[in-house]
Image (cartoon, rainbow, N blue to C red):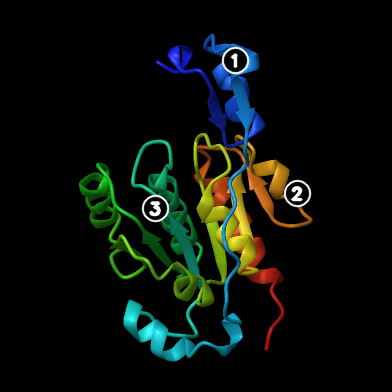
Amino acid sequence: LYRKFPIVFAVSPAIRDILLDNGVDADRIQVVTNGIPLPQNNLNDLRKDEIAANFGIDADDVCIVNAGRLTHQKSQSTIVDAARILRSQGKRYKFIIAGDGELRPALEQQIHDEMLQDQVHLIGFTDRITELLSLATAFVLPSRDEGMPISLLEAVACRVPVVATDVGAVKSLIKHNTSGLLVRPGRPAELATALEQVVEDLPRS
């Protein structure tokens, strides 16, 4: 379908390469990277106890946040698997997954089967991502493929530590062991280890 368009905008060089591989002429592709408005409020000024109560968690919980469509591409099932691994190691982190999609019933069943209802919460769509990120110990993005995801830009803009998969244009924003941690997609054990490293590396108040 894209081959019929007079011009196609790609949100990252990685998406441009996919378009080229699928027969779109190079002279009809322009790269316009995603961007977001910067947060208007200092997250430290927000009443985190009130926000935490609104989301049904405690303000002092280790809170791992993900936001995105509930799809195979976004791979939230890997988060659930990582939560199970961390629980087996005595780590009872809270995972808040914002968003909706066709895989919600499957994720709900996975959470139920692993008895993780008290740790992994699907909260559906929310327009209060900045508030949610104010509670986040870390942001996790386990996608199988990406361009430049808006949710990742939002997490970085809010200065939240990031663990993401090394796919698409993610590594142009996140430098491994410098501005975040990158893991291979579909590897819940790697994801669990990276999340534990981020949590353990954070300064204690």
Residue tagged by mark 3?
80
* Disc 2/disc 3 C-alpha distance (Å): 25 Å
Residue tagged by mark 1?
20
Comes first in the chain, label 1 or label 2? 1
Residue 151 horizontal/vertical position (percent): 51, 55
| Quadrant into which the N terminus falls | top left
Residue at the far top: name it: 23
Residue 122 horizontal/vertical position (percent): 31, 61
User: In the rendered picture of this protein, how many numbered marks are placed on residues?
Assistant: 3
In this view, 172 is above or below 137: above
Comes first in the chain, label 3 or label 1? 1
CA neighbours of label 2 inside 10 A, class few (<14), some (14 to 19), many (20+): few
Q: Do the residues labelled 2 and 3 touch (CB within 8 Å)?
A: no
* Drawn side of residue 2 relative to residue 26, left or right: left
* Drawn side of residue 187 relative to residue 32, left or right: left
Q: Are marks 3 and 1 in contact (CB under 8 Å)?
A: no
* Disc 3/disc 1 C-alpha distance (Å): 35 Å
Going by the numbered disc 2, the residue's amino acid type is Lys
CA neighbours of label 3 inside 10 A, class few (<14), some (14 to 19), many (20+): many
Q: Which quarter of the figure has residue 96?
A: bottom left
Q: Which quarter of the figure has residue 38?
A: bottom right
Going by the numbered disc 1, the residue's amino acid type is Leu
Q: What element carries label 3?
A: helix
The answer to which of 10 and 190 lies nearer the viewer is 10
Residue tagged by mark 2?
175
Going by the numbered disc 3, the residue's amino acid type is Val
